[in-house]
Image: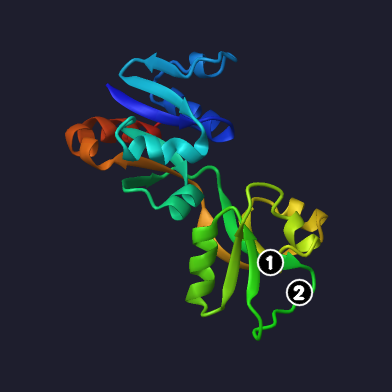
Amino acid sequence: MIRLAIPKGRLGDAVADLLRRSGHDCAGLRNGSRRLAFTMGDIEAILVKPSDIAVYVEHGAADIGVAGKDVLMEDEPDVFELMDLGFGVCRMVAAAPAGFADDPSRVLRVASKYPRVAGEHFARKNRAAEVITLHGSIELAPLVGLSDVIVDIVETGTTLRENGLEVLEEIAPLSARLIANRSRYHFIRTEIERLTDSWRTRP
């Protein structure tokens, strides 16, 4: 039996659709229950906070899981990234108030939920930056003078525009990825490939 870590929320709904394609009964995932573990034939599904998926997989509490590329970039877990699932599509961007002009003579203040990604991005550009870690309302930071720019994920850009911000540059495209525990993968590779093949071929 494969233990699959499924993210709660919208990504989890998309995973349920994939499981349905492979003939699994996903009613338990969609009935409003507060249960966190379900058995569906040859799969044991566990429902996990999206930011924790890679932790469960890396430490072997789950064999495989579905994680956002943003989490994988930020946390750099020691897992196999097996497959781009093609949903949860968005972008990691740097954004600032409309009309922002960078002053290279001073340290750039950057607010982000993704301090590793933000720091490495500006380091690659040889731009001195102070990264300020926040956990919510990132768009507010430049509006109140906490930061000059932000690094965050955007889907449509509506929230940026409504707060007077605009994209300066795209850092990376993002989507949901199937990941696997490195040790377990070698033992259940055939079962994992059988499952993912069914996702690719069924309507």
Number of numbered callouts drawn: 2
Q: Which residue is mark 2?
A: 100
Say which quarter of the image contains residue 34: top right
Q: Position of residue 151 (x, y in %)?
A: 62, 61
Dot 2: few (<14), some (14–19), or many (≥20) neighbours within 10 Å? few
Quadrant occupied by the N terminus:
top left
Is the C-beta separation of discs 1 and 2 under 8 Å? Answer: yes
Q: Which residue is mark 1?
A: 149
Amino acid found under the numbered disc labelled 1: Val
Q: Position of residue 21 (x, y in %)?
A: 43, 26
Q: Is residue 203 in sight in this rendering?
A: no
Secondary structure category for the residue under label 2 = loop
Task: Name above or below for residue 107 compared with residue 15.
Answer: below
Residue at (51, 19) in percent of width and height: 29
Residue 91 located left or right of residue 64: right
Residue 97 located left or right of residue 167: right
Residue at (62, 60) in percent of width and height: 132
Q: Position of residue 120 (x, y in %)?
A: 48, 67
Residue at (45, 55) in percent of width and height: 73
- Residue sitting farthest toward the bottom: 105
Say which quarter of the image contains residue 122: bottom right
Secondary structure category for the residue under label 1 = strand
Compare marks 1 and 2 and give the one earlier in the sequence: 2
